[in-house]
Image (tube, helix red, strand yellow):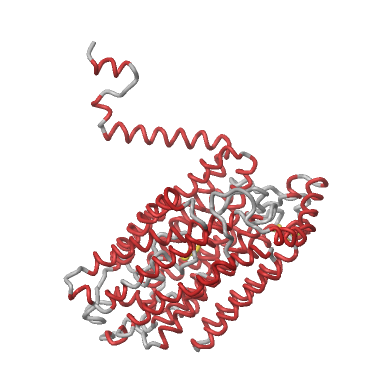
Amino acid sequence: MDDSQSKTKRGELPIYWKYNPCYWSVFGISYFVTWIIELSKTATTGLLVTIFAVQHLQKGLVQSYINNTISFYFRDRGGIDASTLQIYLSVVMTPWALKGLMGIGSDTIALFGYHKIPYMLTTSFCAIIALAAIGTTPVNQISIGVGLSCLFAAQMHIALNDLLVEAKYSEKIQQHPSINADLVSYIWGGMSCMSLLAVGTVGIVIERLGSRYVFAICCIPIFLGTIPVVMNALDDKRVRGGNQCIQYNRTVMRTRGSDYTYLAILITVLSLGLAQSGVWFKNIRFNLILALMCGFITILGFFRWTPPIIAKVNAYTLIQTLFSMSIEGATFYFFTDGPQQYPEGPHFSDWFYTTAIGLVASGTAIIGIFIFNRYLSNMKYRTIFLWSTLVYSGLSLFNIIVFLRWNKQWGLSDRVFVLGSAALQTVIKEFNYMPAVMILSRLCPKGLEATMFALLASASNLGSNISNYSGAFLLDVMGVRPNGSTDEGDQFKNLWLVALITSILPCLPLVLLPYLIPDARPNEEGSLVGEGEQEEEHGDNEEKKAFLSNDAEEGDDDDMFPAGAKVPGSIVNDDLKVAAGSIQGSGAINSSSIGKANVDRNDANNYDF
């Protein structure tokens, strides 16, 4: 018997199967189907279907479509300058800063006996009507206020449904910890695939059909997402005595603590007030002052109503975001203006700006995560934040070369230069994102993870909106006001100086690292809080923990963890990841002034939240 026969007998594949792509394709599909079937036995088929319909189709596909199309839609309207474009982007993304109050509201108030279904169906109906209206009406026949309201409604739907589904799958993981890795892989893997699908096709749709038709297409997956909700595949339990139209649950207020409710209301009021100001008041200086006041009040609110260590970390991430001014409004016109608008410009096509840059950003983000886990996870938080910020700012300085058109003088293609810059900056971006996720996940009080995650996400998204306002002010002061008009090349003459300022500013908050970030490593065990702060935190949360304990003894599971609430020990959810992901601005390459991030966290930002 020869060697090949003996190897086959020992279980190795014959060579004609081993290198056959058809075999491995069939094997991969078979393995995936088996994996899904096994996962559904514990996680339930209904939950997996709902996750696909809400997280994958809507947060992964629809949100990526919308976020990558908004700037083109406003460009097609004409006459909207860079500063105004940034403010409109902030207004549209405001719902992601309301997730704290969304969570408390849905957990506290049951509509027709349910905590999730009525909210999800109501926002779905509003989103479909809004996107259909904006998608089928020519851009010059719809007012800017109506357009912003329609996009606001769509983002509200995605944010709320995302939050409620997060709560449900976190409860399932708490009940069955063994499915943690598999379920999270299913969720994030599906969203990543759908985001890539959106990025890979949105440019073609915009070029062939027009930006508004992207919104019309989004109505289809949103409608499909309502089917499992109507069938209650999410298993939304009907509350006891749920015959009333509106039912208030006081237990939630006790378990969450009134302090966190006050903070959620504060962030909501500030976010909505800032959005209203951006729409109705055209004074950029006034809007900047109001935005900075909102950021300052948010920081004070966290110090007033959360444990000191959480307030400190949130203050650092928020301040870092405030200093990472977004200038996406100007860079969008710089890269997408045609020969008539900017003869010396790069003249990127809609496809290249959305799809090519987005695919590079998504691919290099995975590389960044791998490098961090392999080489940086043993470094201290402060060291990671320090060097990642410095390197990121240094790489951002290369954008000046493009804005001054030096690369053309050197014979370097705009496309090659931009793709390389975007790839490097995205990798470094992940080095700042990952430690923030880890540090915040270890700081949330037990039993209050869901509320704290939502509050951190809300504060982070508010900070991203503020960075748009500050960036709009800087563009206006420096005379960078492109709007897609003919022969507007002079509007970009100071863009290099704006890029220089926005590259340096994120380094300034580094002086606060010793005071706001714990001196610890990601893989260290034990508390990140000092002894003095531990005593203070214990005193602040003693009453809340007592309530949790009493509820556990007195009531059933529905009283202890009402529908929509996440239980102690739940996973680090999307809210936290988005909150951490916004440290450097609103997108992997947005704050670097090269295009924008086309694969959303969502942040969201592009922030998810």
Residue 344 vs 389, above or below: the answer is below
- Residue that appears at 56% across and 44% down: 47
What residue is shown at x 46% (from left), y 53% (from top)? 57
* Residue 524 in picture, x, y percent from top left: 57, 49
Report whether 80 appears left or right of 447: left
Q: Position of residue 25 (x, y in %)?
A: 32, 36
Q: Is residue 91 visible?
A: no
Q: Residue at x 53, y 87 (%)?
A: 281
Quick one: 524 or 350, which is closer to the camera? 524
Q: Horizontal and vertical percent for residue 433?
A: 48, 59
Residues 522 and 123: in front is 522
Q: Nearer the viewer, residue 580 or 214?
A: 580
Residue 453 screen position, x and y as percent: 61, 59
Q: Quadrant of residue 76?
A: bottom left
Q: Please indicate, yes or no, whether residue 28 appears anywhere in the rendered image.
A: yes
Where on the picture, by quarter, is residue 513? bottom right
Query: In screen coordinates, is 570 left or right of 80?
Result: right
